[in-house]
Amino acid sequence: MSLAITLAFFAVGLLGMPIAFALGFGSLIGLWMANVDANMVPQRMLHAINSFPLMSIPFFMLAGELMIKADIMPRLIGFAMAFVGRVRGGLGHATMIAAAGLSTVSGAAVADASALSGTLIPELRKQYGLPFASAVVAAAANLGPIIPPSGAMIVYALMAGPTVSIGGLFLAGVIPGLILTAAMMGWCSYIAWKRDYPLSGEPFSFRNIARQMKGSLVVFLMPVTVIGGIVGGAFTATEGSAIAVVYAMLIGFFVTKKLKLSDLPDALLRAAITTAIVGAMIAFASTITFLFTIDMLPQKLAALIKEITADPLVFLLIVAVMLFIVGTAMESNAAYIMLVPLFHPIAMEFGLDPLHFGFLFVFNLVIGMLTPPVAVVLMVVQGVSGVATKPFMKEVWPFVWVQYGVLVLCMLFPSIVTWLPRTMGY
């Protein structure tokens, strides 16, 4: 039965049907084969989305949309350029730092790709040429779901159940996110020296940093307030996401004064569409997850993997290879919803730390957003910049391997991921 559901899902996916339709079609096939009462479908679907933590997704989406419309990018770029100073490839470094700052607001790679593309590609293109400029922006956008808050981590925690804390998973992404930022800046520096790109930015000075920080402080206080409150237990992730929306509106209306009432309908609509897509996938996937459970697929899969290996590291490598393949062919939210209920219980049987495994799972699928044919970040950046596919991909692949290098580092040294959340009591 489980095989039939899986084949039905991928068959519909390959035909180009919407993911939610594929999930619904797969669940109907499974119900028919299992001879399960169809009346349970609406009950399971309603139960799956009747979740208080799930409300944090639209609020964080809306907060990110409002902050982008509030025109915070010039402040982030100014701070990043002051921090980097006058160095070769400095604009590429500034792009990575600005993307890390934007990630603390948006929590989504696609939103970051859109904001960074429109703001930075014109200037990057002048210094680096269009293919490398587009690749820098695409790679930087992938910091969105790694550095908290992260919509992907929220979806993972919801699908994994009570063994994974949203706050703990947020903290798990902090140190790897900083390492990833530094690693990609290193590659930008190497390419800048190799190709003799011009110096950019003003000479480094603490006075310049202080001046830029003064203008950017109100932006950086948002993630400190929201993430700090969630981690500290002052409020839940859902309450924190609502606070983020209010904070974003205050910044847009009274600080940058770039946000207008006429911007609200579009921001609300974009957040609602994204939330509806995720909600529909979760609702349909809950039926398939139920069928997988009664078919005991996780237990069967765990037994199969344990016949292959009893080493947790080998298991992680097997999962990484599978997610690499899945990431090239499936949208990441669909992959979380379909695969987390299967692999998370197996990881627990192998004795893996739930936060460590959860972060690796999310990171692996985030990298998949840069690997074609289903590479939504590349599609967004290419749509804005108009760069040709072949030279674009030639420049993107090194960034993909850098990100996989950081993934392997986190896999081999779990404390990189778990030290901060464990220190904070998770």
Image: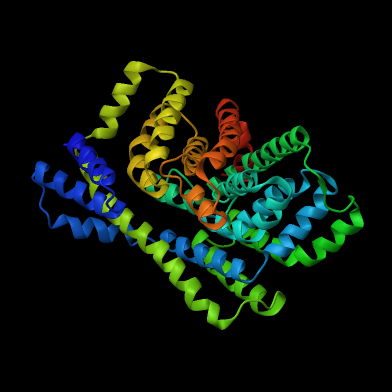
Res. 109 visible in picture: no
Quadrant containing the C terminus is top right
Left or right, 121 with respect to 327, comes to: right
Q: What's the coloring here?
A: rainbow
Q: Residue at x 84, y 49 (%)?
A: 85
User: Residue 417 placed where, x, y %?
Assistant: 59, 37
User: Residue 337 placed where, x, y %?
Assistant: 35, 47
Q: Residue at x 55, y 58 (%)?
A: 114
Left or right, 49 with respect to 378, comes to: left
Quarter of the image holding residue 263?
bottom right
Quadrant containing the N terminus is top left
Image: 322 above or below 363: above
Viewer-side residue, 153 vs 25: 25
Q: Residue at x 36, y 48 (%)?
A: 334
* Outermost residue toward the bottom in this view: 261
User: Residue 278 placed where, x, y %?
Assistant: 37, 57
How many numbered tags mark residues here?
Answer: 0
Left or right, 255 with respect to 49, comes to: right
User: Residue 338 placed where, x, y %?
Assistant: 33, 43
Image: 410 above or below 65: above
Res. 270 visible in picture: yes
Viewer-side residue, 148 vs 240: 148
